[in-house]
Amino acid sequence: MSVDMFCKIEGIDGESTDDAHTDWIEILSYSHGVSQPVSGASRTGGRTGGRADFQDFTITKTIDKATPDLNLHCCNGKHIPKIEIELCLATEEKHTFMKYELQDVIVSSVSPGGAADSSETKPLETVSFAYGKIKWEYTPIDNTGKAGASVDRTWDLEANKQA
């Protein structure tokens, strides 16, 4: 099933005209990861974990009116209080099934690129965000389009604990 993805950054407007996401940034792809460093088994017990390692949250988008501000934020290290990313089923109802909320954010990288013979209408850029807190929220959608009860979890990277 097709998915539409949007990103809202406090203080930075995008060009989305979607009814539920006006002025959000339309994104083409995203990536984010968390890993747990694990030590080998010891004499006193099994494997042990450490502090989770969080990758930057990265989006790919077309160059748009948010581009200059994203570059400026990267240059000056300006903190962004909150960023929201929503993944929606590409249906008439646009049900949001996954949300990410990042807090205490810094733009860590902006990397544009393109080619003259590209099939894209505009060149693309990849933008990465470092953050102090992340919330994951999933809402199941049944076959009739009805939303179920959402499940959410939050991790505070600075405190290294669930929030």
Image: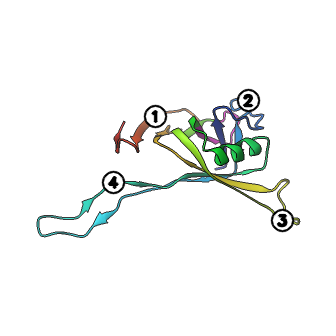
Above or below 149: residue 105: below
Q: Is residue 40 left or right of residue 5?
A: left
Indicate the position of residue 49 as horizontal and vertical percent values. Answer: 28, 58
Give the mark toward the camera: 3 or 2.
Answer: 3
Query: 10 Å neighbourhood of mark 4: few (<14), some, or many (≥20)?
Result: few
Q: Which residue is mark 4?
A: 51
Q: Residue furthest right?
A: 116
Q: Is residue 122 left or right of residue 29?
A: right
Which mark, residue 150? 1
Query: Which range is magenta?
Result: 84-94
Indicate the position of residue 31 as horizontal and vertical percent values. Answer: 57, 54
Q: Quadrant of the C terminus?
A: top left
> Please, what secondary structure does the residue beneath circle 2 have?
loop
Asked if residue 27 is among those painted magenta in the image, a careful observer would answer no
Give me the C-alpha separation between circle 3 and circle 2. 32 Å
Query: 10 Å neighbourhood of mark 1: few (<14), some, or many (≥20)?
Result: few
Q: Which residue is mark 3?
A: 115
Q: Residue furthest front?
A: 76
Give me the C-alpha separation between circle 1 and circle 4. 27 Å
User: Nearer the N terminus, badge 3 or badge 4?
Assistant: 4
Give me the C-alpha separation between circle 3 and circle 1. 41 Å
Query: 10 Å neighbourhood of mark 2: few (<14), some, or many (≥20)?
Result: few
Viewer-closest of 105 and 75: 75
Q: Residue 51 lies in what quarter of the image?
A: bottom left
> Please, what secondary structure does the residue beneath circle 1 have?
loop
Callouts 3 and 4 close, C-beta under 8 Å: no
Q: Residue at x 85, y 54 (%)?
A: 121
Callouts 2 and 1 close, C-beta under 8 Å: no
Q: Is residue 93 left or right of residue 143?
A: right
Give me the C-alpha separation between circle 3 and circle 4. 41 Å
> Please, what secondary structure does the residue beneath circle 3 have?
loop
Residue type, mark 4 in image = Arg
